[in-house]
Each structure stands twice: as structure tokens, then as C-alpha cells.
Image (cartoon, rainbow, N blue to C red):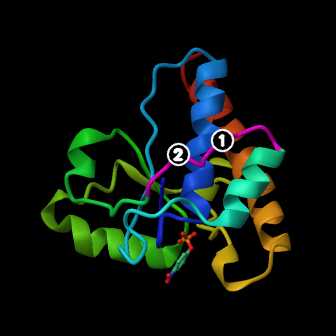
Amino acid sequence: MVCLGNICRSPLAEGILQQKVATHNLNWVVESAGTNGFHVGEAPHKFSQKVAKKYGVDISKQISRQFFATDFDNFDKIYVMAKDVLDDVKKIAGNKFDENKIDYFLNELNENTNENVPDPWYGNEDGYEIVYKLIDNTCDAIIKNFKASKK
Ligand code: 4NP
């Protein structure tokens, strides 16, 4: 799960998907990272923590880290939250960039639309609630799509 700062969107995606993965007894390793490195070492944004807690997901222990080229070696799937994140991931990954492993996160919800998860960093607290629900629905879709692909 990759966004710019790894403090607003991708920590929610990490926490929400980890919880669903446990519920569905899937043995996936889910991590998140940011491309810009501005908030490395920090906990998620207070409003991301607050909305997650409201829905029973604890993301308070997460620590922002930068996205690495080697994430393409270590993970089967890389989800980007938006087009600017995809551009950054391409630059960071260099020759490790793998078209087959990467996708827009929201394509799991709305196939082939390449939509961006709005960045709540630039708005007020309401934006975090909207983004939470969008990410939660998309994490449900990830698991549903995965199960359908195994049938
Ligand atoms: P995120 O939001 O990518 O969802 O974590 C942002 C947080 C911080 C910044 C940009 C986006 N920033 O430029 O500091």
C-alpha cells in the first residue's frame, strides 16, 4: 500500500486490510510505505488514527517508512493510491519496476478506471471519514476478487 507521506491513506489501507486478512485466515504480509519520505519515523496522522479507532482498527503503532525499489522483490502486489504516487514509484524502483505487480488501489473496486484515492492531507477531518470508507470498501473488494480468482 503506497501513498506519498505514509501517514494518511496507506496506513489506513495497511491496518484495514491486515484486519480483514486475519478474519479470512489468509496468510498475507501487508505493509505500507510512502514515496516522499517527509514523515519517515512518524505515527499516522491523528485523524487517520481517530477514524480507524472509531471503526475498531488500531493503526497507532505504525511508523512511516519510505518506499524502496526492493519492495518489488519482497511483495507480490504493490498498490498505489494515486497517479503521482505511481510516477514516484517508477522513479524509485528504476529497473526493478514491474508492471505485472503494480496497480491502482481503486482498480480493485472499479476495474481499469485508474482512479485516485483523494488525499485528505489537504482538507479537513471529514475527508478522513470519506477516505476510510473508500479504503474499507476497496479492501473488501481485494479479498472478494482474490477469492473469485481462485474458483
Ligand atoms: P498521504 O498524505 O500520502 O496520504 O500520507 C500526505 C501526507 C503528507 C504529505 C503529502 C501527502 N506531505 O507532503 O507532507
In the rendering, which numbered label is found on residue 36? none
Q: Is the residue under label 2 in contact with that under label 1 (CB below 8 Å)?
A: yes
Q: Outermost residue, left direction? A: 95
Secondary structure beneath disc 2? Answer: loop
Does ligand 1 reach within 8 Å of label 2's beta carbon?
Answer: no
* Rendering coords of residue 111 (x, y %): 64, 53
Tell me which residue sits at (68%, 60%) in the image: 48
Secondary structure beneath disc 1? Answer: loop
Judge whether 145 appears above or below 94 on screen: above
Query: Magenta stretch: residue 70 in it?
Result: no
Instruction: Please tell me which residue lies in front, 109 or 84.
Output: 84
Tell me which residue sits at (55%, 64%) in the image: 81
* Rendering coords of residue 78 (x, y %): 41, 51
Q: Residues within 10 Å of mark 2 (few under 14, many from 20)?
A: few
For the magenta stretch, what is the residue range? Answer: 55-63
Amino acid type at circle 2 is Lys
Q: Outermost residue, bottom direction? A: 122
* Rendering coords of residue 53 (x, y %): 76, 46
Amino acid type at circle 1 is Asp
Tell me which residue sits at (73%, 49%) in the image: 52
Judge whether 107 appears above or below 127 on screen: above
What predominant SS class does the magenta segment belong to? loop
Q: Which residue is mark 2?
A: 61
* Rendering coords of residue 30 (x, y %): 46, 38
Lateral position of residue 76 relative to residue 58, left or right: left
Instruction: Please tell me which residue lies in front, 124 or 150.
Output: 124
Tell me which residue sits at (66%, 29%) in the image: 20
In the rendering, which numbered label is found on residue 58? 1
The answer to whether residue 86 shows anywhere in this view is: yes
Judge whether 119 appears above or below 113 on screen: below
- Rounded to the nearest whole Å, what is the CA distance between mark 1 and mark 2? 8 Å
